Image (cartoon, grey):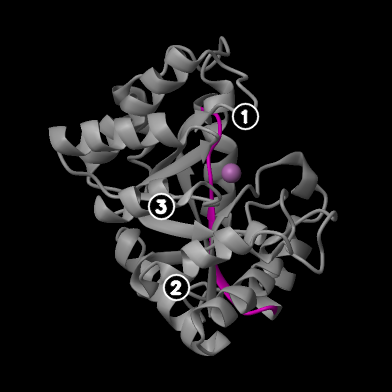
Amino acid sequence: MLVDSHCHLDFPDFAAELDDVLLRARDAGVGLMLSIGTHASKAAGVLAIAERHPQVFATVGVHPHHVAEPAEEGVTVETLCALAAHPRVAGIGESGLDYFYDFAPRPAQEAAFRLHIAAARELGIPLVIHSRDADADMLRILRDEMAAGTFSALMHCFSSGRELAEGALELGLYLSASGVVTFKRNEDLRAIFRDAPLERLLVETDSPYLAPVPKRGKRNEPAYVAYTAAVLAEVKGISPEALARATTQNFLRLFSRIPASAVGGGGAA
Ligand code: NI
């Protein structure tokens, strides 16, 4: 059984056929999905999906793209903690820094990121981190915040440089591989995953974005995490079964609010 540690099932891309998407995931051996929040103001939508489907859990948070939007600007640690009291919430995020798009001013991104870290630390649940073209600032903030009090976290869709990978691993963080590791020219990224400890690795789709080869360019969905897992198994020199076992164990160790019995939907229909 595989876990898709990062998907966006509440996005309109899936609205018309969510049940089919979940059936295809099941048929592909994906026993658990974590649907990631991007807006505090839209948390109810993600939570409703997790309430309806026993194999789906959720996170709550504000994506760095949206932190300066009027509906999200007032989010506090208390807002996040209140949302995370919901029984289907397993983590905080996604939060972090995106200097590729720079949709929100960088100081606002950093301030929001620190709020999310504070919430994750206070609740003792993991933070899902988004980081793009912000390696130096990301590492600076992670080191600074970890020194102020430990928290657990996952670098989602890891596609940054080796220094950030090694720094994050040193701080106890996990790295998640997305379809980006299947893209032909990303030899350096595959080498980072090859050298990282297997017990710190997860897999994800980030669907509806970033479909792995051979689905690249199409709308992504949780079933396709199997393609990414197959490439990661090859990179690690282990069987797809061993890779699935390890990444699922890692997921459950990190997202400790989720019982192992939830994998596969916990016997529910
Ligand atoms: Ni995402």
Question: Which residue is at a point 48% across and 62% down the rendered structure image?
Answer: 192
- 3 or 1: tag closer to the N-terminus: 1
Out of 187 and 252, give the one closest to the viewer: 187
Q: Quadrant of residue 166?
A: bottom left
Residue 77 against residue 263 in the figure, above or below: above
Q: Which residue is mark 1?
A: 100
Q: Earlier in the sequence, mark 1 or mark 2?
A: 1
* Range of residues picked out in magenta: 28-39
Q: CA distance from mark 2 to mark 3?
A: 17 Å
* Disc nearer the start of the sequence (2/3): 3
Q: Nearer the viewer, residue 229 or 122?
A: 229
Q: CA distance from mark 3 to mark 1?
A: 18 Å
Do the residues bearing badges 2 and 3 touch, measured as CB atoms within 8 Å? no
Left or right: 233 as drawn, with respect to 18: left
Q: Residue at x 56, y 9 (%)?
A: 70
- Could you classify mark 3 by the number of other residues whose Cα lies within 10 Å: few (under 14), some (14-19), or many (20 or more)? many
Labels 1, 2: front one: 1
Residue that mark 2 sits on: 247
Is the distance from the Cβ of mark 2 to the nearest ligand 1 atom less than 8 Å? no
For the point 72% across and 50% down, the residue is 208
Q: Do the residues under discs 3 and 1 have CB atoms within 8 angstroms?
A: no
Q: Give amino acid for label 3.
A: Ala
Task: Kindly identify which residue carries mark 3.
Answer: 165
Give the percent coordinates (x, y) of residue 139. 35, 37
Residue type, mark 2 in image: Thr
Say which element carries label 2. Answer: helix
How far across and down, in percent of the image, does residue 140 sit?
31, 31
Q: Magenta stretch: residue 36 in it?
A: yes
